[in-house]
Amino acid sequence: MSLLIVILGVLALLLLILVFKLNALMALVLVALGIGVAEGMTVSEALASVQKGMGDTLGSLALILGFGAMLGNLVSESGAAQRITYGLIRRFGIGNLQWAMVLTGFVVGLPMFYNAGFVILVPLVFAVAASARLSLLYVGIPMAAALSVTHGFLPPHPGPTAIAVIFGADITLTLLYGLVLAVPAIVVAGPLFSRTLGRYKTAPPENLFKVRELTEAEMPGYGVSMFTALVPIALMTIAAVLGLLLPVGSGLREFFNFIGDPVMALLLSVLVAIYTLGLRRGRSMADIMKVMTDAVASIAMILLIIGAGGALKQVLVDSGVGSDITALVSGTNLSPLFLAWLITALLRVCLGSATVASITGAGIVVPLLAGTGVSPELMVLSVGAGSLMFSHVNDPGFWMFKEYFGLTLPQTIATWSVMETIISVMGLLGVLLLEQII
């Protein structure tokens, strides 16, 4: 009966979001309360569980996402993202433009939300394609694939970071495993897949990008731009590697565990960016603070939706559904990693939002950890991969890609949707392979 209630709850969530167009935050809270009461909790107990789930999730995420948004906005608004793109293209040359766009999407995407990264980079895709006389899809798909992978697999993005908190996974270790999975997923879904799309013709709107690009003098240097964007990833990666190599109690390990903690890594990165992309270039502190304030305001709803996903997870745990799910899975031969991917993929196809699908999927499958002993870091990546499955008409990213590149609906499905599916399946295969190694 408990599992039936969860299934009905998920269906109710779909109904509220897709049919009644209710905001995901409100829908998640209402469904969490409804499941709690239906599972036998009193209204007060269900409400307390919702509040605890919101608090526990946001307590560890708010600073990470806030600092990440600040860094992303500074990298974007200062022209550092534009400089990184042009610098990589010059270094790779026209013959290797696809790989330049992959690295551009990867580097710019690390500290930035997908939509923001896409909007920043798509004008450059048009400029590069025009100057090199190449197909827009040939240049654009590698960039989009890199952005999508960083969004779905790698902390400090909202989805992977929130899932890591829900599963109690080590964020830096998740980042390290995620980087291992990211490379083959991007290569297959980006440069290799884009070379099969020559038959599709794009028809973007005329005069689409007449906005002013920053001049050479207005942009920061390539070295400082790349350095600033990579600071948080470098700190977290070094901490993860030293955690594997050095013994417990080592002073060096403890030091890097401190500065490599996601909160500290991002805080230090923002401080570095304030100087390298702001003060050093003659900008006032008031101007820099406005950029950072605007960044935090832009993620307010995302934070609340993630918190609501944590509330749903807490209700599922407190109501005792977890034991039923664990009992069901223990009687099957299916891998918990595959089940986590499958449940999240179904939610993604139905809901559209990768973040909502990943948070909801994590809440449903979190009991599998206790019953199977599977790596929580691999569970994070499995859910993250599932959250990218087959983006279609209920996903804003689908329409963004369609309209910017001037594709028909069938063409967008054959390009964007298939690209997302390749990333998702590659992620699943990578997770299953890593399970055999670690």
Image (cartoon, helix red, strand yellow):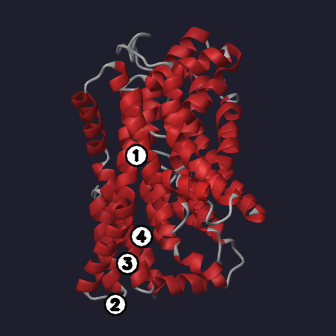
266 lies above or below 311 = above
Q: CA distance from mark 3 to mark 1?
A: 32 Å
Q: From the top left corner, tell me how far across and down residue 8 is, in percent.
A: 41, 75
- The answer to whether residue 336 is left or right of residue 154 is right
Location of mark 2 (residue): 40
Q: CA distance from mark 1 to mark 2?
A: 43 Å
Q: Amino acid at mark 1?
A: Leu
- Mark whose residue sits in front, 3 or 1: 1
368 lies above or below 69 = below
Location of mark 4 (residue): 10
Q: Residue at x 47, y 21 (%)?
A: 82
Asked if the residues shown at circle 3 and circle 1 are in contact, with their CB atoms under 8 angstroms apart, the answer is no
Q: Amino acid at mark 2?
A: Gly
Q: Specify few, some or many for label 1: CA neighbours under 10 Å numbering under 14, 14-19, or 20 or more.
A: many
Asked if the residues shown at circle 3 and circle 4 are in contact, with their CB atoms under 8 angstroms apart, the answer is no
Q: Secondary structure at mark 1?
A: helix
